Image (cartoon, grey):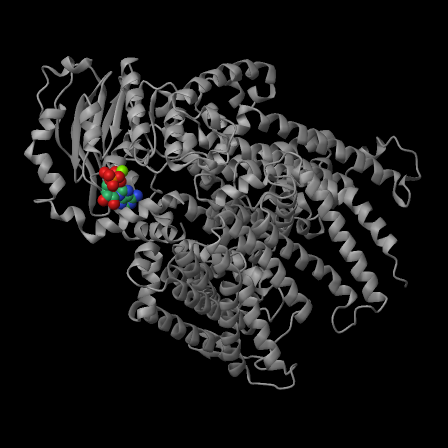
């Protein structure tokens, strides 16, 4: 196979605006409310996605309509956020991180378990429950896009709806956070005792943050489930949450548009490096003893990890944040 | 900042009187907390009920093998098995806990230190590098390599970050990134398969009265106990151990009284990483074999143990780790093995909810 | 000058006041073996400036923490303007009109000076999650708040910094900002923990004038201070703590002449106050600023 940089670019662009980017933008917008604005280190964000996705899939599977499933999924995620939150937001950040990651793992293990198989279909997961969504697809069959960056009609439908959802959520977060409500969140992020001393109900705000972040996360889960017509416990591994952190930190925590920019860039970079590496390996530019085609996927994660470490250390404000704010830390 | 976290923990553990609510009867029962606990308990109970009937007991090999035995014997054997698991968790989590105590860092990359040890020992033992050494020797070398790795992390990453006064949340995110990097480097290096060590690959259980156990597991128990006892002794008796505790209790004071805090932290990293590596080898021998995500899979169990015992202290990690191992293993007598982890994680959460004061120490001082 | 309200009040610890705004009964707090606070009875007169003094580690800050809901006592009751405060979370205490500042300044460094000020305001519907979505409703209020903040910033010589991040302020300026921000809550009782520490003498002078003005507007002030000149100058009444106990109280002249106070400060009969153990925890508290 020839080395074709243009094709790598096309792949990367497709993924930068495709379903993965939508998924992580949505998940990131939710995480941003908790982590970016409120400073809550929720490492179990993927739990909200799981609840959203499974809520939808199970409801439809039991004969309910799709819209009801979506509603149930999101409601369940809000409840989950409160359930996480009620007892735990009083804990310090590191404990919150541990508890939430454990809680999300419990959820995943439960959906996987044979005990819940009648509902969740265990490790096999649930498929084909979102035909109703694709029935609504207004685009006739065919291929759409710009230049070589194209999608088929169904994917395009999912992407369009997805980006609209992202826009809606970003708008909501922007409305909330530029208002005095957001000011209180930022105060809590920095010093919750100061906020308390000024009469702010810190506990309540943190719960609201978890509930809103969780609901948006659930929406991401719904999108994922509906778009792919499948849910499976192992799609909801802890690593998803960590990638969502990478997206948020890349874009700029505490910026409404941060996760969107972060997700687009993240997927562009990830897919571009992967495509280039794959081609380089198969074209023989990279010798086999160093890297084989199967190992390229692992290299991606190494780059993500490195990027995460470097960003949080040297540019914690991400792309959109202000440098000024982070300089304060150094004082 | 960092020194304080530990001292708070410590103070809390040593005087339960410190929990104002308890002493005064002022405590307003926290409804949300109770609700959360109740929900977890109900969930586990419900699941256990179903699991018993359906796939429950057949899911586990040990249990199948033991099917003919009396309940008492099965119970004993399960406890011994749990002891092996627990000792491994204890070994691996001492470092996790001590590093937190001394530097305030919650290291989500600690699992990778465990994997690192297991993998290095595997390569040495398999002879991939042109020479082959017996597993016991390989283990010692892996432990040494582990401590060098730990030192490298402190010198190369966490020390400099601490000096830059990077906030705690950022440090935690850094450990996440580090975990991704190391895990996948190991994946490329070691491959995605699960490998057994060349030595001790096949093991036969021997009977000691009602207990039947393989030689390797027996050796793991004995060596682990010895090592943990030694660690305890070192911490209690040596100058270094005392210095560690001093730094944990109050970093500034320790520094002022002439302790070289940097050195103490470095030593903690080296010791902790060495123990993690040892635990990794044991996990590879005793259980699943070696794989690239062996340590990552243990991470939450380590957290569970450490939190159960009290984050920040070595003895807490030992006791908590052993408890988690035994409890999860014993639970499989009644519950499907699928729920082992669920139980461990639920235990973690419940402990944090029921006694956050006890574990967190006293409330953070304000004003 | 409300000095005469104390005309009939005897300078003995725990004495009753004609019109107390704050009444404390049996509040105590232990840290392990250390009794940080142990107050039998204490009253603070409404509309006066009450100084709270005592050697380092006397328990002054801990008492503030307990009374304002930031810490939970091992026992005791206390009330503010007739409201029982036992078990009330800190934010509810603040909303009742009893607002405190911190010894280690808690300026919100990554917010602008103006945002810090606005945060103090109460009754902003935009701080509610649904209210936030109705900007036309909170904008009006926001303007009002801003106007109030301007006045205070002017008063505290911070007006030129209004759009800077609070993190760029000097230590003394942060103290001022914290005080101004607390006033945004419109408290009826303000509790200041060493508000003058680190503030330059000229500014201290004007701060004192402000604090007196607050009293003259009808606010009650309790403040902790180590500078005796300041205390004597501005306090209508002085409370003295040592080793967790209220050991003396009275007008400035009474306190200055009280041998128990001098003892407490010189540590003659209170040698334990400076044991290494106390020092340890002390330094622990100090670095919490970082
Ligand atoms: N969270 C805590 N844990 C343990 N001991 C504490 C804690 N908070 C305060 N103390 C101890 O309680 C005592 C009273 O402390 P406090 O800070 O109230 O003194 P203070 O009168 O404000 O002193 P200063 O004038 O130096 O500010 C001290 O001995 C202190 O070490
Ligand atoms: Mg004080």
Q: Position of residue C150 (x, y in %)?
A: 46, 19
Query: Is residue B333 among the parts visible in the rendering?
Result: no
Is A111 left or right of A93, judged from the image as shown? right
Quadrant for ligand 1 reads top left
Image quarter where the N terminus of chain A lies is bottom right
Viewer-proximal residue, B304 or B362? B362
Query: Is residue B216 among the parts visible in the rendering?
Result: yes
| Quarter assignment of residue A8 | bottom right
Question: In the rendered image of this protein, does residue C181 appear above or below residue B338?
Answer: above
**Which residue is pictured at 77% across the width and 42% down the height?**
A19
Q: Position of residue A203 (x, y in %)?
A: 45, 32
> How many tags in the picture?
0
Question: In the rendered image of this protein, does residue C144 appear above or below residue B225?
Answer: above
Is C103 left or right of B211, judged from the image as shown? left
Question: In the rendered image of this protein, does residue C220 appear above or below residue A19?
Answer: above
Is B190 left or right of C270, judged from the image as shown? right
| Quarter assignment of residue A219 | top right
| Quarter assignment of residue B354 | top left
Viewer-proximal residue, B233 or C173? C173
Q: Position of residue B125 (x, y in %)?
A: 59, 81
Q: Position of residue B363 (x, y in %)?
A: 34, 42
**Which residue is pictured at 62% across the width and 60% down the height?**
B181
**Which residue is pictured at 57% across the width and 39% down the height?**
A36
**Which residue is pictured at 77% across the width and 45% down the height?**
A16
Viewer-proximal residue, A312 or A115? A312
């Amino acid at each position: 196979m020839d080395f074709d940089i243009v094709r790598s670019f096309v792949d990367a662009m497709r993924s930068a605006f495709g379903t993965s980017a939508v998924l992580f933008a949505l998940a990131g917008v939710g995480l941003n409310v908790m982590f970016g604005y409120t400073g809550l280190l929720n490492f179990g964000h993927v739990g909200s996605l799981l609840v959203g996705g499974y809520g939808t899939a199970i409801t439809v599977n039991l004969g309910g309509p799709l819209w009801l499933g979506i509603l149930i999924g999101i409601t369940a995620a809000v409840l989950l956020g409160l359930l996480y939150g009620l007892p735990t937001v009083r804990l310090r950040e590191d404990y919150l991180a541990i508890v939430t990651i454990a809680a999300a793992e419990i959820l995943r293990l439960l959906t996987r378990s044979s005990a819940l198989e009648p509902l969740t279909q265990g490790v096999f997961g649930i498929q084909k429950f979102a035909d109703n969504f694709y029935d609504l697809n207004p685009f006739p069959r065919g291929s759409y896009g710009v230049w070589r960056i194209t999608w088929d009609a169904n994917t395009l439908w999912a992407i369009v709806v997805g980006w609209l959802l992202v826009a809606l959520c970003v708008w909501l977060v922007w409305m909330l956070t530029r208002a005095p409500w957001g000011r209180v969140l930022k105060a809590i992020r920095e010093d919750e005792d100061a906020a308390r001393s000024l009469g702010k109900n810190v506990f309540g705000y943190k719960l609201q943050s978890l509930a809103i972040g969780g609901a948006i996360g659930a929406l991401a889960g719904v999108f994922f489930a509906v778009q792919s017509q499948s849910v499976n416990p192992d799609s909801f591994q802890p690593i998803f949450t960590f990638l969502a952190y990478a997206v948020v930190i890349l874009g700029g925590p505490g910026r409404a548009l941060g996760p969107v920019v972060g997700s687009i860039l993240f997927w562009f970079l990830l897919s571009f490096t992967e495509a280039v590496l794959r081609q380089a390996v198969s074209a023989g530019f990279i010798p086999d003893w160093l890297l084989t085609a199967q190992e390229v996927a692992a290299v991606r994660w190494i780059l993500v990890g490195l990027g995460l470490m470097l960003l949080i250390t040297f540019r914690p404000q991400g792309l959109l944040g202000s440098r000024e704010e982070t300089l304060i830390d150094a004082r | 900042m960092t020194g304080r976290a530990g001292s708070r923990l410590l103070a809390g553990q040593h005087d339960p009187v410190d929990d104002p609510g308890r002493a005064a009867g002022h405590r307003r029962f926290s409804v949300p907390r109770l609700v959360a606990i109740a929900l977890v308990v109900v969930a586990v109970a419900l699941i256990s009920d179903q699991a018993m009937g359906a796939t429950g007991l057949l899911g586990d090999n040990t249990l199948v093998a033991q099917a003919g035995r009396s309940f008492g014997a099965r119970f004993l054997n399960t406890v011994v098995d749990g002891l092996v698991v627990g000792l491994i968790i204890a070994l691996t989590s001492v470092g996790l806990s001590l590093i937190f105590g001394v530097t305030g860092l919650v290291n989500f990359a600690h699992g990778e230190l465990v994997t690192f040890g297991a993998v290095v020992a595997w390569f040495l033992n398999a002879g991939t590098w042109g020479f082959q050494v017996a597993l016991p020797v390989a283990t010692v070398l892996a432990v040494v390599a582990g401590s060098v790795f730990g030192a490298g992390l402190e010198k190369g990453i966490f020390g400099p970050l601490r000096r830059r006064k990077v906030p705690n949340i950022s440090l935690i995110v850094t450990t996440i990134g580090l975990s991704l990097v190391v895990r996948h480097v190991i994946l490329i290096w070691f491959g995605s398969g699960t490998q057994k060590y060349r030595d001790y690959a096949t093991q036969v259980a021997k009977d000691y009265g009602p207990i039947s156990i393989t030689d390797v597991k027996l050796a793991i128990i004995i060596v682990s106990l010895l090592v943990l006892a030694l660690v305890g002794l070192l911490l209690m008796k040596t100058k270094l151990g005392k210095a560690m505790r001093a730094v944990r209790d109050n970093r500034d004071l320790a520094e002022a009284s002439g302790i070289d805090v940097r050195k103490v932290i470095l030593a903690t990293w080296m010791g902790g990483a060495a123990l993690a590596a040892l635990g990794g080898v044991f996990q590879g021998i005793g259980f699943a074999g070696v794989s690239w995500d062996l340590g990552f899979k243990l991470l939450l169990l380590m957290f569970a143990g450490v939190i159960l015992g009290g984050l920040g202290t070595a003895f807490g990690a030992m006791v908590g780790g052993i408890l988690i191992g035994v409890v999860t293993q014993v639970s499989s007598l009644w519950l499907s093995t699928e729920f082992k982890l669920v139980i461990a994680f639920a235990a973690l959460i419940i402990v944090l909810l029921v006694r956050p004061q006890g574990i967190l120490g006293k409330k953070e001082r304000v004003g | 000058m409300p000095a005469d309200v104390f005309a009939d009040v005897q300078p003995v610890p725990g004495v009753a006041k004609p019109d107390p705004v704050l009444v404390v009964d049996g509040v105590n707090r232990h840290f392990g073996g250390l009794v940080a606070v142990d107050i039998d009875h204490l009253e603070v007169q409404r509309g006066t400036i009450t100084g709270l003094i005592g050697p380092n580690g006397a328990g002054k800050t801990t008492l503030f923490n307990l009374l304002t809901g930031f810490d939970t006592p091992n026992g005791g009751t206390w009330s503010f303007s007739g409201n029982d405060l036992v078990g009330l979370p800190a934010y509810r205490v603040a909303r009742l009109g009893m607002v405190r500042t911190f010894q280690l300044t808690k300026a919100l460094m990554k917010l602008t000076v103006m945002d810090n000020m606005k945060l103090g305001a109460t009754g902003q519907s935009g701080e509610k999650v649904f209210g936030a979505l109705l900007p036309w409703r909170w904008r009006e209020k926001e303007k009002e708040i801003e106007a109030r903040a301007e006045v205070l910033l002017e008063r505290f010589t911070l007006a030129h910094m209004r759009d800077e991040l609070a993190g760029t302020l000097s230590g003394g300026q942060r103290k001022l900002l914290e005080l101004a921000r607390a006033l945004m809550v419109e408290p009826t009782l303000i509790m200041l923990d060493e508000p003058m520490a680190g503030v330059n003498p000229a500014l201290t002078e004007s701060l004192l004038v402000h604090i007196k003005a607050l009293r003259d507007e009808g606010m009650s002030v309790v403040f902790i201070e180590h500078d005796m000149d300041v205390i004597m100058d501005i306090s209508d009444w002085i409370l003295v703590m040592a080793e967790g106990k209220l050991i003396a109280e009275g007008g400035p002249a009474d306190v200055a002449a009280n041998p128990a106070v001098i003892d407490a400060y010189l540590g003659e009969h209170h040698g334990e106050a400076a044991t290494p153990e106390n020092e340890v925890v002390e330094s622990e508290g100090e670095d919490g600023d970082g």
